[in-house]
Image: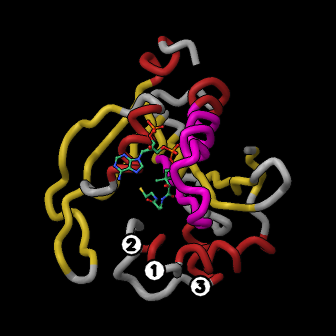
Amino acid sequence: MRLRAVEEADLPLLVRWMNDPEVRHWLHHSDRPDATVESVRGRFGLTEERFPNLVWLIEMREGRPVGHVGLLQVDPHHKRAELAISIGEKDCWSRGLGTDAVRTVLRHGFEDLGLRRVDLHTDADNARGIRCYEKCGFVREGVMRARRLRYGEPLDMVLMAVLSDEWLGRGE
Ligand SMILES: CC(C)(COP(=O)(O)OP(=O)(O)OC[C@H]1O[C@@H](n2cnc3c(N)ncnc32)[C@H](O)[C@@H]1OP(=O)(O)O)[C@@H](O)C(=O)NCCC(=O)NCCS
């Protein structure tokens, strides 16, 4: 697995992954209108925002693109960011790629960018995601009740975070 910068030419692939019903099921925008090249460009900070979004494409060794991972809303004052990840190629789920990509991004966030905290929120029933994040050092901090709608029904989300002290103490 390697990470590379997302380019304009990747946007249609990201749109395809995001609109795949089985992937979209787990994503915050599952009840929003279909993703478009424009909406993805906006979400991934290829437009101006107060805090930058850093997004990379996840590629297999042979160069096959399989998903994306990012640090969103990188806040240089509070030294924190939000992790976002999605593997759009479903044959690549549960093969350790997510763990590898998240660890790579956390290492960059803590060791290069000097972040203090990286957090995320994920669907409370996303057992695969939660297991992946726990393996990377994320700790559950609480449940955000009815945080989003999925197919019109309120859904709890789990708030998770990892702090730089915990990360640096792990010997990663
Ligand atoms: C969530 C996601 C990024 C995780 O990446 P991944 O490469 O699949 O995860 P990994 O293989 O590194 O780790 C998954 C772990 O969960 C386990 N797992 C898989 N399905 C599980 C289930 N139903 N219940 C519990 N654990 C499960 C795997 O066995 C593995 O743990 P292990 O290494 O101890 O065996 C990826 O699956 C994905 O993009 N899914 C679809 C979209 C999504 O959920 N995005 C995240 C939104 S917050």
Is residue 136 or residue 82 the one in the foreground?
Answer: 136
User: Marks 3 and 2, how far apart in space?
Assistant: 17 Å
Q: Are marks 2 and 1 in contact (CB under 8 Å)?
A: yes
**Residue 118 image-quadrant placement:** top left
Mark 2 — residue? Answer: 25
Q: Position of residue 108 (x, y in %)?
A: 65, 32
| Magenta residue span | 83-106
Mark 1 — residue? Answer: 21
Q: Position of residue 113 (x, y in %)?
A: 63, 31
Within-10-Å neighbours for mark 1: few <14, some 14–19, many 20+? few
User: Marks 3 and 1, how far apart in space?
Assistant: 15 Å
Eyeballing the image, is 51 above or below 18?
Answer: above
Is residue 128 or residue 6 the one in the foreground?
Answer: 128
Specify the label residue 36 is tagged with: 3
Q: What amino acid type is highlighted by mark number 1? A: Pro
**Apparent side of residue 135 relative to residue 57 in the rendered image (left or right):** left
Q: Secondary structure at mark 1?
A: helix
